[in-house]
Every structure is written in C-alpha cells, then in structure tokens.
Amino acid sequence: MKKLLLFSSDPGGANLIVAMHAMLKEAFDVHIYGKETSLNIYQKNELEYKNIKDSIFTITQGNVYEFVSSQNFDGILTSTSADDFTERLLWLAAKKRKIYHGAILDQWMNYSLRFLKSHRSYQSKEKYNLNEYILPKNIFVMDEYAQQAMIKEGIPAKYIKVTGQPYFEHFINQHKKPTSQNRNNEKLTWLFASEPITTVYGKEKGLDLYGYTEQSILYAICNAINEIPNNMIELIIKPHPRENTEVYSKICNQFNFVSLILLDSVEAILQSDAVLGMSSTLLLEAALLNKPILSIQLNLKIKSPFILDQIDKSKSVLDEKKLKNELVLLSEHRLGLMNSKFIINLTTEQNAIQNIFFSIKKELND
C-alpha cells in the first residue's frame, strides 16, 4: 500500500484534510500531519495526526527534505497557505524525491499568494512569471472560475484540475438538516465572522492592501447598529482561529451589545439570525445552511475577494453611508419583512472528494 502524507497548516486547509482522509485511507497508508491551528480541527474531528514540528524542529528546506526522505512517502497532498511556507517546502522535497505532490484550494481568493516564492514584495502585481512560483504537480480547485482566475495570474493551466471543493461537499453531507437554531424571539443575534487580516499583514499593510481590516469593519458595524432606533440587536464576534481573542476586549467593553463566542462554527451559525463578515468561508457555510448573510468590505481597494460577489450572487456593502440601511433591511428580515437578497442559493460542484481521490490514485498507480 502506497504511503501518503496529508498536511495542512491552517483551519481551512485542515477542513479539506478532514473531508478527504476517509476515502484516501481506503486505498493508501495515510499519515496526517499539521501545525498550529490546523491541529485543533484535526482533534475536533477525532483524526489520528501528528504535529509536524515534533518531527521537524526548525522548518527549513533542508530539514523538510530530510523528513520526507526518512519517512519514505510515495506521495504528498497538502492544503495551501498565504504566509506559511511549509506546504511549498513539502512540494519542493517531493519534486526532488520525484514523488507525487498535489494541493487543494479551499477559497476563491489570494491565488498567487499561496504559490509565490516570496509573496510580501509582490502583493501589488496582477500576474507573475512562472519562475516566481513554487507549484505542485496538481492543484485541485473549486470550479472553472477559480481555474481561469489562476491562469490570468500566471499559473499554467496544465497544473490546475477542476474538481469541486471537498470540504463543502463534506459540510453539506454532515449538515443537511440543521439541529439547532436561535430561539431568542426578543433579540436579533448577528454573528460577525472575523478574518486574520491584521494577524497576517499588520494593520497598516492590511489597510493598504484591502482598504479595511477586520477591526475597521467591526467598528463600522457597531457604530451603524448604534444608530438604528430601538434596535434589539446582539452582535457576537466569532474570531478566526489564528486571532488573539484579547484584541476584541476593547470593543466588547465599548459596546454593550457586543460579545465573543467560542462555539464551533456550525453551532455559532445555527444560533444566529444572520451572519456578517468580509469574505470568510464562514459566510459560505452560513449560505449553505440557508442563513441570511451580508458581506461588508468598506473602502475596498481591490477586486472583491468574496466569491459570491465575483459570480454576481451577492453584492458586498462598500460604502459606509449605505451600511446602516442594509443593516435595517437585515433586521427586518427576521421580523417577517423577508428580503430574499440576504438568502443566497449556493450550490457546489458535485463529487469533489471522489474526483480528487481518483486523480491521486491514478497518479500513484501509474
């Protein structure tokens, strides 16, 4: 049986491994590794896994190659990350070892940043040369939209396979019938899905790159809620796993309707009346569960990273002057004045897990 390494370094990537591992274990000797926030996802889903830092004390190209060689893997499948280079070092090691290596995308954003040799100095470019990339043999992507976007950014089509998003398939199968929902008939409970923009880029770089940070959007939402007369809105912050929750203590103290929630993402969605955010995967999960969603990207400087904007299924709020009106409409949705624009009929590519499985099986058996 061929020996296959599965690796992720963040929660979105870990969800992909969770979705894929069961079918892959039917055909391969699977070894799951992760680091940092991905480990929490593995543990929650009761996967057998190892922290790669226990095997590679310092993550360098040489050390990663020694690890891959010593373990005698026949293939490597990873997620992708913007600012963590472990996946890229694993691909380089696999290429040097002449073994199979593939990667799965989890989101319709930051395509180039996931594959660049050094992304921080290239953030303003729209297209890159092939020699600026570190690419695995296969990149499994969600749909043709992602495929074409990557090609425009300089990633050759021969590397890209359209398979669907395996975690969304897994998510839908797991949550066909929501088991709980918000029962508070007096208050409206809105969930804010945060993103680690400041954590990844820093405040100034985040504002320069996007035009906003998670903090600036959150403050704008709170100020707009304050202006809604006689509102009964409770805003719950769902921090991204990579964020330090202490950064939200100030805003929770400043606005008495704001608090933190540390529930599982699905439970947090189900206990909310609507989900607000920028471009988080949690917004997509909420849409899959038929929850009202609202993307808010005030002062956006780039093309919207939110996929539902890109495919014209939604329109993010970009102007602070319009934000209050949108929040009023969203509050009326719960009150029975239904506004269908907040409910997105989101569908996904079929058989993503199977598509990736058979592609890898063919590669390893050739």
Image (cartoon, grey):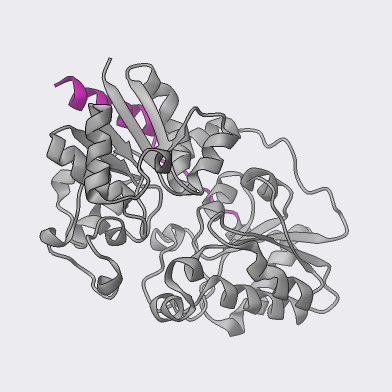
| Vertical side of 120 occupied by 139: above or below | above
| Vertical side of 74 occupied by 193: above or below | below
Task: Using the image as rendered, state which of residue 30 and residue 212 is in the foreground.
Answer: 30
Q: Residue at x 19, y 56 (%)?
A: 151
Residue 290 is situated, as x and y percent measured from the top left of the image, at: 62, 47
Instruction: Tell whether position 297 is magenta.
Output: no
**Quadrant of the image for the C terminus?**
top left
**Quadrant of the image for the N terminus?**
top left
Residue 216 is situated, as x and y percent measured from the top left of the image, at: 57, 78
In this image, 38 relative to 231: left or right?
left
Task: Using the image as rendered, state which of residue 310 and residue 45 is in the foreground.
Answer: 45
Q: Residue furthest bottom?
A: 321
Task: Using the image as rendered, state which of residue 70 and residue 116 is in the foreground.
Answer: 70
Residue 193 is situated, as x and y percent measured from the top left of the image, at: 60, 60
Residue 132 is situated, as x and y percent measured from the top left of the image, at: 16, 62
The span picked out in magenta is 343-366
Instruction: Tell whether position 357 is magenta.
Output: yes
Can I make out residue 138 in this image?
no
- The quarter of the picture where residue 300 lies is bottom left
Q: Residue at x 31, y 36 (%)?
A: 77
Q: Residue furthest right?
A: 186
Q: Residue at x 27, y 43 (%)?
A: 64
Task: State the count of labels.
Answer: 0
In this image, 21 relative to 273: left or right?
left
In this image, 152 relative to 291: left or right?
left
| Vertical side of 176 occupied by 112: above or below | below
Q: Residue at x 64, y 70 (%)?
A: 247
- The quarter of the picture where residue 275 lies is bottom right
Can I make out residue 63 in this image?
yes
